[in-house]
Amino acid sequence: MFDKKINILKQAENGVGLITIEATVPTGFELVAKDECLKLFGPDTTIYDYRGSIFFNIPIKDYNKVSKLRCIDHLFLVGPYFENVEVFCKNNPNFENTDVIKQNDLKLIGELAEKGHMDTTLKAWREMINFKGNAFPTKEEHLNYKVAVENKTEDVDDTKKVLKFRATCYRSGSHTFSSMEAATVFGGKLQDNFHWVVDLSDFDLNVVLNISGS
């Protein structure tokens, strides 16, 4: 079953104008949501159902139809998928709890923020929610925006408001690092690469890093 989910993610990455949506649903309503999805987007829609959620691929132009699904709780736009990322597992018989291993693992996680097709995902997200701010600021634009906000000398035009974000990590498996540590490193690299503003409470975008398995 997990292979089917991977295939859906790969299909969207390789397709033109395709996006993967994760919709969370009350446990027990997965098949109802799947049936709704097939009726709304067509019988050829690729869907993977899992406990509490469904994953499906649709053309980005059809995103507005998603709100017509009646039994969903939350929606997520799924970004790039990385396969066979070899972080160290605590269950490995050769495991030694050293800071060197941990720092190497966290460095690898940070590199994921650089390697993904984040530009494509961001452009899709911006279009879907009609984000008016600056999702691709330069370092200078980031600094100018921070100064304007801190000084409160004038209202900042919507188009000049730099995207505010937070990073969250969910993981399954036994690792050398905590979810908080992974989120901190991943979010830090995103900020370095995209010059966004970190805001843990009033954010425009919550980037979720999912780590499955060991």
Image (spheres, helix red, strand yellow):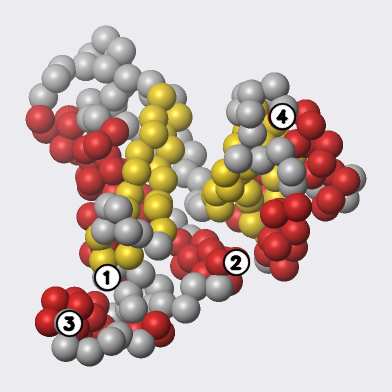
Residue at mark 1 to residue at mark 4: CA–CA distance: 38 Å
Disc 1: which residue: 195
Q: Is residue 59 above or below residue 52?
A: below
Q: Disc 2 marks which amino acid?
A: Met
Is residue 47 left or right of 185 when viewed as pictured?
right
Residue shown at the point (18%, 32%) measured from the top left: 102
Answer with mark 2 or mark 4, whichever residue precedes in sequence.
4
Answer with mark 4 or mark 3, whichever residue precedes in sequence.
4
Residue shown at the point (78%, 36%) measured from the top left: 34
- Circles 3 and 1, Cβ within 8 Å, touching? The answer is no
Q: Disc 4 marks which amino acid?
A: Glu
Toward which corner of the image does residue 95 lie, by quadrant?
top left
- Circles 2 and 3, Cβ within 8 Å, touching? The answer is no
Q: Nearer the viewer, residue 32 or 115?
A: 32
Residue shown at the point (40%, 53%) measured from the top left: 206
**Mark in front: 4 vs 3:** 3
Disc 3: which residue: 152
Q: Nearer the viewer, residue 59 or 34?
A: 34
Q: Image quadrant for the N terminus?
A: top right
Q: Is mark 4 on a helix, strand or loop?
A: helix
Residue at mark 2 to residue at mark 3: CA–CA distance: 30 Å
Q: Is residue 195 above or below residue 110?
A: below
Disc 4: which residue: 30
